[in-house]
Image (tube, rainbow, N blue to C red):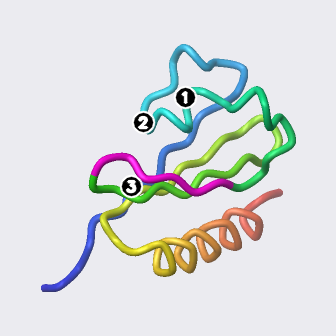
Amino acid sequence: EGGHRLTLYVSNDATPAAAVGPADLRSPDASRPDTAFSFAKEGPLNVFCWRDGPLRYALTAAVDRAALTQVSAEVYKQLEQARP
């Protein structure tokens, strides 16, 4: 009760045509090629995106920016710890 659905999309830059999820994940901003982290709003959802090597991530949820940023930081930390 009182929970929120969060969705994590993962895409490989080598296969952009196969990407699913938010437009920010599918279409990198060519004017900002070195951007590692970004925040956007897509309809009722807030979207926090980041790149890590060839992988692109987008975490989406209908929560405020501060909450999504906090969860995104934890997801990023756990992904880094799981890296071989």
Of circles 1 and 3, which is in front?
Answer: 1
The span shown in magenta is 38-43
Q: CA distance from mark 2 to mark 1?
A: 7 Å
The picture places residue 35, in percent across and down from the top left corner, at 79, 46
The picture places residue 24, in percent across and down from the top left corner, at 54, 38
| Residue, disc 2 | 21
The picture places residue 66, in percent across and down from the top left corner, at 51, 80
Q: Secondary structure at mark 2?
A: loop
| Residue, disc 1 | 26
Which quarter of the rendering shows the C terminus? bottom right
Mark 2 and mark 1 in contact? Answer it, CB < 8 Å.
yes
The question of residue 21 being in magenta is answered with no
Q: Main secondary structure of the magenta part?
A: strand
Residue type for callout 2? Gly
| Residue, disc 3 | 7
Q: Quadrant of residue 77?
A: bottom right
Mark 3 and mark 2 in contact? Answer it, CB < 8 Å.
yes
Left or right, 3 with respect to 59, comes to: left
Which quarter of the rendering shows the N terminus? bottom left
Residue at x 38%, y 55% (from the top left corner): 7
Residue type for callout 3? Thr
In the displayed structure, 26 sits above or below 44; it is: above
Of residue 82 and residue 5, the one placed in the foreground of this image is 5
Q: CA distance from mark 1 to mark 3?
A: 15 Å
In the displayed structure, 18 sits above or below 79; it is: above
